[in-house]
Image (cartoon, grey):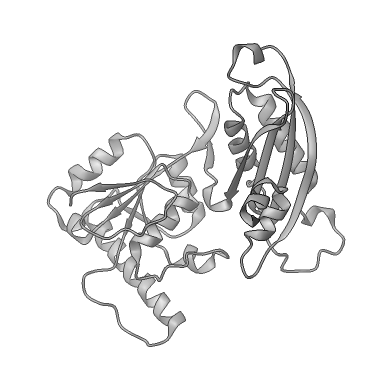
Amino acid sequence: MTDIRLAFAHPEERAEASAGADPRDRISVRDHIVEADIGAFQQERGHTQRLRFNLVVEVRPQQTPLADDVDRILSYDHLTDSIQAELAAERLNLLETLAERVAERILTAPQAMRVFVRIEKLDRGPGALGVEIVRSRAAVPLRATHADGTEGALHPRVVFLSNAAIAAEGLAARLDALEAGGQPVILTVGPADLPPPASNHGPTQRRIDLLAIEQNAWVLAARDRRCVVVATRTEIDWAMKHRQMIVWAPSKIVLDTVDGPKAPARDAVALALWLAEMLAADALDVHGDVSVPAGSRVPVTRVPA
């Protein structure tokens, strides 16, 4: 009965029910009604209908006092402006598409960490017909200007190369094929086959394991000049916008991220999946015979080494 009640509860109650042990602050917009021309059926075209929006946004905790300064918070205007901007961008057939785009736009705000979006059509039946989605900052794609001048989401392809794939004679041809796909390519690797030093201290061992991965990233870089090692999100975003192939050195991003990966650093494929989710990648290609954790929202494709 609790699950059924929550299925129809306001997104604010659903956000509270799914919060972790250290829940974030939330802001919400309730029963925001606008008129829009939307729908896949012919009788919906050329006519506006009422849409009701309920939004809840979990926000990043403030590290310093707000000092009653409106510029330091996530404004309600950002939520309603996101709705208007997406409705004005183009006519859509599906509420699902509108919900995705509204969520993506809201999550561009640096304070926003997770968003619940519920949209209902009020004029299409005896009741309200709607959809609800939940999206987190980990799923927000980078936006870039395409060759035709339009702006849109940029979805990279994240690739995990096993040590056998790195050492294979056909590495250059493998990279050629990845480049030919036209998407930004982010290469990830695990540590070398030799075990890293053991410190018997959790935080220290995490750093050692991450550095072992980075050492192997430089091994890959030495094998092909296209494999440029990068460590920061700024470098990754720049490379994605310029369609450059890069190799991820994970230490800085993993250690600096508030909601970082929960998997141990030695589980390099799990780190690659986490990166793929954070960058809203189309897929994770796993080259080689390695185990892949279950439960990722990113499709996983296996490629022989």
Residue 183 versus residue 123 in the image, above or below: below
Q: Is residue 96 left or right of residue 83?
A: left
Q: Could you tell me which residue is drawn at 72 percent across and 54 percent down?
A: 13
Residue 201 versus residue 28 in the image, above or below: below
Residue 215 placement (x, y as % from top left): 30, 68
Q: Is residue 285 left or right of residue 262?
A: left
Q: Could you tell me which residue is drawn at 42 percent across and 67 percent down?
A: 263
Residue 157 placement (x, y as % from top left): 37, 44
**Nearer-the-camera pick, 282 or 31:** 31
Residue 57 placement (x, y as % from top left): 70, 51
**Nearer-the-camera pick, 79 or 52:** 52
Residue 220 placement (x, y as % from top left): 25, 58
Residue 85 falls in image quadrant? top right
State how many labels appear.
0
Query: Is residue 165 in view from this perspective?
Result: yes
Q: Is residue 300 left or right of residue 254?
A: left
Query: Is residue 74 in view from this perspective?
Result: no
- Residue at the farthest front position: 1
- Residue at the farthest right position: 68
Q: Is residue 181 left or right of residue 156?
A: left
Dividing the image into 4 quarters, which one contains the N terminus? bottom right
- Residue at the farthest left position: 169
